[in-house]
Amino acid sequence: MSDNVIPFRHKVKKTKEPVPAVCELAGLVFKEVIIMGENHEGQVQMITTVSDPAEILWYMEAARFGIMTGGVEDE
C-alpha cells in the first residue's frame, strides 16, 4: 500500500432487515434525515427532509469525516 492511501479498519455490521429497521429508528430519533441508497434497479437515489442543498452537503461531509476518523458504531 502506498503512503497516500489510508486504510479503513472500521467495519459496519448489518442487520437482516436493515432498511425497515433504520427507517423506523430514524423516524423516532431524528428531526431531519437524509437517506441515500441503491434502488431495486441499481440506481443511487436520495430521500431527504432537508431542503437546502448546502445543508445536505454539510451533513454528507460530516458523515464522511466521521467514517474516516472511525466514528462508526455497531448496531
Image (cartoon, rainbow, N blue to C red):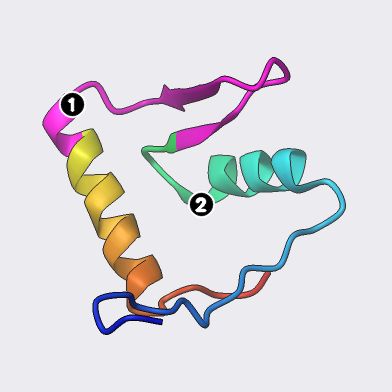
- Residue 26 location, x and y as percent? 55, 45
Q: Are marks 1 and 2 in contact (CB under 8 Å)?
A: no
Which residue appears at 80% of the width and 58% of the height? 15
Q: Quadrant of the N terminus?
A: bottom left
Which disc number belongs to residue 29?
A: 2
For mark 2, give the secondary structure: helix
Front-most of residues 20 and 37: 37
Q: Earlier in the sequence, mark 1 or mark 2?
A: 2
Magenta stretch containing residue 39, yes or no? yes
Q: Furthest-left residue in view?
A: 54
Q: Furthest-right residue in view?
A: 16
Front-most of residues 44 and 5: 5
Rounded to the nearest angstrom, the CA distance separating label 1 from label 2 is: 22 Å
- Residue 59 location, x and y as percent? 26, 47
- Residue 49 location, x and y as percent? 37, 26
Which residue appears at 65% of the width and 47% of the height? 22
- Residue 5 location, x and y as percent? 32, 75
Q: Look at the picture and state if 2 lies above or below 30.
A: below
Which disc number belongs to residue 5?
A: none
Front-most of residues 67 and 26: 67
For mark 1, give the secondary structure: helix
Q: Amino acid at mark 2?
A: Val
Q: Would you name the residue on which mark 1 appears?
A: 53
Q: Quadrant of the C terminus?
A: bottom right
Magenta stretch containing residue 41, yes or no? yes
Give the magenta range. 35-55
Q: Look at the picture and state if 25 lies above or below 45.
A: below
Mark 1 surroundings: few (<14), some (14-19) or many (≥20) residues within 10 A? few
Which residue appears at 34% of the width and 78% of the height? 6
Q: Is 6 left or right of 26, judged from the image as shown?
A: left
Front-most of residues 12 and 27: 12
